Image (spheres, rainbow, N blue to C red):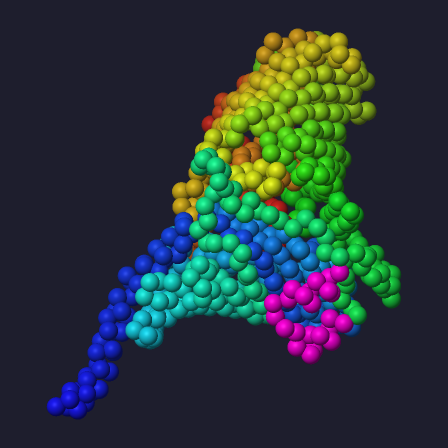
Amino acid sequence: MRKAIYIIILLVWPYVTQAALCAYTDNSDSIVSMLIEHCSATKENTKELFGNLYIKQRVGVFKNNLLLNTFPGMPRFEKETKNYLTELFYQFHYTDYGIMELRRKSHNTTFEHGSGEIEHITEFIKGAPLIPHQLRDIFFPLDKECSRYYTYTVDSATINNGKIQRRISFKSKFDNIRLLEEGWVWTDDSCNISELYIKGWDEQSRYEAIYTMGAEHGERNVVKNVHIDMDYNFAGNKLSIVADAIFDYDYALSSKKATGNNDKYNLTGETNAAWVTTIVGNRKEYARKNRKLELDDDEKAMLGDSSTSIGRELPVTVSKNKMWEIGDKIISSHTYYWNSGRVKFSPLIDLSHIDYSSSRGLSYKLSMNLTNNLSRNREIRFKPQVGYNFKQKALYWNIDGKWLYYPSKLGDIGISIGEGTHTYSSAVLNKIKEMKLDSLDFNKLNLKYFRNLYLEASHKCEISNGLTLLTGLNFHRRELEHGSDKTLESYGVKLKKSYSQFAPHLRLTWQPGMYYYMDGRRKVNIGSKHPTISLDVEQGVNGILGSNSIYTRSELDVQYKLPLRPTVNLYMRFGTGGYFYTKDVYFVDYAFLKSNNLPLERSEELGGVFQLLDSEWYNAANKYLRANFTYETAYHSLQKLFPRIKFLKNEYIYYNILFLSKLCPYMELGYGVATPYVDMGLFTSSQNGKMHRIGYKISFSLFSD
């Protein structure tokens, strides 16, 4: 009887297990939903991660040309060398609100120039611990808001120790640079991920990556190991890059805040980000003691005498081609270090520094960053910048300096000197008010432009969390341009050849609900879900340092980024301001409404810029009212119409409106797209309800990151 029961069980068991697996497979939609919800919960429950990261990266060069060495930030490949090896050692710190920081402890490399780090591949590793939310700029299939771009299937399942493990495959619905082509994930019956595979492409390469989760209970939902294979093929340059990374977690997954911390906006964990501050004395010895993966014989041979060691300068190589050596200097960004500081020069030739629009013409800028770290988290920074506008034929420059003396309160003392926008005096304002808009032509007004040399000193400190007070003194020297009319009479006002302006300055900025954490003694603001409100007041004073300009300027500015969904944002900006209690001649120079001479950062563009407004209008009224709206989406509506356009990253819709004395209102409507190579926008404007102009803007973005 017992034997008969065993035989029946053996015959029936395959059908039972198959039915169970089919039940799970048929219920694939609910399984995928559970997995996505589990990933979201993991992010919410992960308060802090801290530990060490080891990366071993091997690069093989199959084909190389001179263009590869023109990429700023890329390592410089030698003509005779075809294989390179780099070991990188980091400390990492993750806090909730999605902030991941890395600090280099050491590196060991066979590259003769630079540290050997190729950002193009390490970005897949730096964001790895919570991959659904941190991985580069990709629409990840395990994110709830991005799941609409993928199809899912439960294509296999197994039973191990009575627990079901499923392999869930995903595939993108259409081909786009921000989507993964395909991949799969292994998950258990509790939706814990054990292994993840992804495959995709971007503007320079095709890649495959495998992420393996930790086996220990505390590390079960975070990445432990990463393996990446990448075929780099761009502009005739072909590389093979293989990288392995190991995360070594020193801290529990769901750690609590520091003891005694009752501020809900303070995300400082118990580790308090105990970063390494000492410089490693010998890279080779450090690598020998701390590497997580053994080197094979070939790799040991590569890391022979050619590997660099910290504590001495990189070896100086004499190029056989002097012209190539000079060219390398021109297209490279250069960073020099000393005991406690560094200075970084931007490349002389860099596409990301070029900006062109139909209204402002072509402009180009160069910059340098100098930082000197002092004791107790204090530091001194200097940033010189120079730019040229070819349409205006004007050279602009400025030097910004800052001493961060009170890091726990973001207290700093700043100084800025430079040459601002050339402008005309207030003597023109009454003439503009008298003229009809149809007959108003700035080219026929015989405007007398003044150069603007300025010196600004300021002190800034955070009064309370999110509330910052800036006080300062501004001094401007306005000098009549040499090309202006010799007659100093302007619409009934006798102008001087030069004006001095001395003005105390105050700015109060408030962003409520500011999240932050403490990095030792240094406060690091992360961001807020609320608008930023700024009040800026400046009072011209007569008689100090030859000042002869009396006025009161006051402006109110509100900026807000409203996340509608993870893939959709609405940027809004509202502002008003004006000049009051004016006496004698003054110069309209608003703090928040101005024509920027040098190429803007992308964040500033989204913050509210009038693309087609002539620069003369910014100084043409003693009062203004403005509003700017930018709708950012990644729905790829243009790609749905033209499927072959695969490189779209974001689309933008712009609406700007401005009220001045003669523009009631001035309006702009625009549409723009962002790609890995170039950002483009098409705009149309109207003045007082009448069509005014159609224009465009182009800025290169290939190297902007």
Q: Is residue 461 above or below residue 603?
A: above
Residue 65 image-quadrant placement: bottom right
In magenta segment, residue 292? yes
Q: Is residue 376 above or below residue 491?
A: below
- Residue 412, image x, y percentages: 66, 30
In magenta segment, residue 424? no
- Residue 701, image x, y percentages: 61, 50
> At 61% from the left edge and 20% from the top edge, which residue is drawn?
506
Q: Is residue 621 left or right of residue 389?
A: left
Residue 414 image-quadrant placement: top right
Q: Which residues are magenta?
A: 282-304
Depth order, front residue of 374/393: 374
> At 68% from the left edge and 34% from the top edge, which residue is drawn?
404
Overall secondary structure of the magenta stretch? helix
Q: Is residue 497 above or below residue 130?
A: above
Q: Is residue 603 left or right of residue 340?
A: left
- Residue 179, image x, y percentages: 46, 60
> At 79% from the left edge and 48% from the top edge, which residue is drawn?
338
Depth order, front residue of 457/138: 457
- Image quadrant containing the N terminus: bottom left
Q: Is residue 85 above or below residue 8?
A: above
Depth order, front residue of 219/302: 219
Residue 6 image-quadrant placement: bottom left
